[in-house]
Image: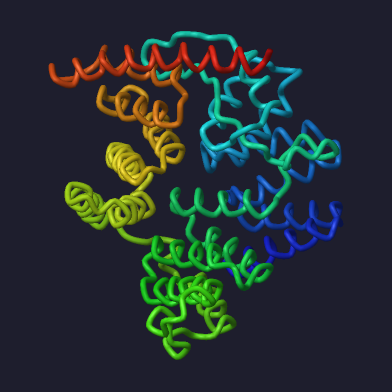
Amino acid sequence: MSVLIDTLNLGASQTNSGDYSAAIETYLGAIEIDDRSATAWFCLGVLHSKTGSKIDAVEAFERSDAICPDHPPTLANLAYLLAESEPERAGDLAKRAAPHLEHDQELAAIASKSKPEEIPERVFIESQPIHQDLADNDPDADNYNDIDENDRKEEARTLSSSGDHSTAVSIWKDLLEQTPDSPEVWRGLGEALRSAGYNDRSEQCLKRAEQLESQASRESMQDATTVLDEAEVDDDEFLLIAAEESLHKSEFEERGSLDDSLGWYNMGINLLNEGKNEEALSSFEKAIGGCPSSEVELRVKAQNGRGNALYNAGRYPESVVAYHTAIGLDPQSVSGRTLFNMGSSYAAVEMFNDAIKCFTQALERDLEKSETELCEKQISRCRILSREQAKRQSRGIR
């Protein structure tokens, strides 16, 4: 595993220095080591895009998506690449990427060209997405997502959620070498280690994040009790080495069992009922990461639980992705309550047409009477809000 991590880090360094040809060879080498590395395929896709190898880029992003489904930058990149040759498929990909990518006008244009199609046994979402400017509206920027810091953070979080803890930790470690004083990156590394079960190392990284935040605001927070004691936290280099050592442990290859995953899932449910959303989220992610791939039912339940925890925590775009992941694992088992929850998430981020679709399909499934009444009220409310939104947008265009 350490060889793969070193290879990925080398590829990232070569990419950042502009040596694309060498970086491509490096990532191809990483794939020879582990052809299930979603990160290697994703980075290879970006490089092929930047060097004009469109067919190779599409293939690489498709391989990455097959390994790590519903990663927003991967979906967006595929949408850009397929916009002319396969507009309907590109539109669907653009819509799936929408909850995480705001203010991207090109992605919105691609999404608008897709052909609506009702499929009875699965969820169809008609997006008018929240757009994200992936390149700060730089007119000279490429159409394709660079491997910038924000994309890599999102990549690391997605990999942790899917159970690929070793690659997630390696990405955070690489980011930390670039920005050693970033509390966000230290916190990301800590959360990745916690998801993998390394609580001691996680706590040290989280303390380091708190220390950096305290130092940044020290002029307005003079009380010494608010500043962490230096002796409580290992120095940065030691923590990086500790994270690297964690990657070498065999537990990353095979962690947990069905019984362990059931235990984490049940703990997540209990924590969710107690209103402890962040703790519940961590439990659901551990259940997902350790669950055997054959246990689809448990993985679906854990993803739904993760979606509920994210929704309760106000992380609505992430909750949409979690619900989509659950549905993608087993479209036939989608419940009315899952569709209702997804609709609520879409409504929270003002994607009212998508919310209406979800609520409408929820009515066709196993809702109780009180839930049905609430669902109908939500549909009515979202229709009103959608019309008001359309009027505002129309006035803005004029």
- Judge whether residue 135 can be spotted in this image: yes
Q: Position of residue 120 (x, y in %)?
A: 38, 10
- Judge whether residue 294 can be spotted in this image: no
The furthest residue to the bottom: 231
Q: Position of residue 181 (x, y in %)?
A: 61, 72
Left or right of 126: which side holds 282?
A: left
Q: Which residue occupies 66% across, 55% down?
A: 149
Q: Which residue occupies 51% across, 79% down?
A: 242
Left or right of 176: which side holds 124?
A: left
Q: Is residue 269 above or below residue 59?
A: below
Colour mapping used in the image? rainbow
Q: Which residue occupies 65% across, 13% down?
A: 113
Q: Count the marks.
A: 0
User: In this view of the protein, which residue sits in the foreground, 377 or 193?
Assistant: 377
Q: Position of residue 262 (x, y in %)?
A: 23, 51
Q: Is residue 236 above or below residue 305?
A: below
Q: Quadrant of the N terminus?
A: bottom right
Q: Is residue 351 above or below residue 63?
A: above
Q: Quadrant of the C terminus?
A: top right
Quarter of the image holding residue 303?
Answer: top left
Q: Is residue 251 above or below residue 65?
A: below
Q: Position of residue 48 (x, y in %)?
A: 79, 41
Q: Which residue occupies 66% across, 71% down?
A: 177
The furthest residue to the left: 369
Left or right of 202: which side holds 394?
A: right
User: In this view of the protein, which residue sits in the foreground, 331 or 175?
Assistant: 175
User: In this view of the protein, which residue sits in the foreground, 281 or 48?
Assistant: 281
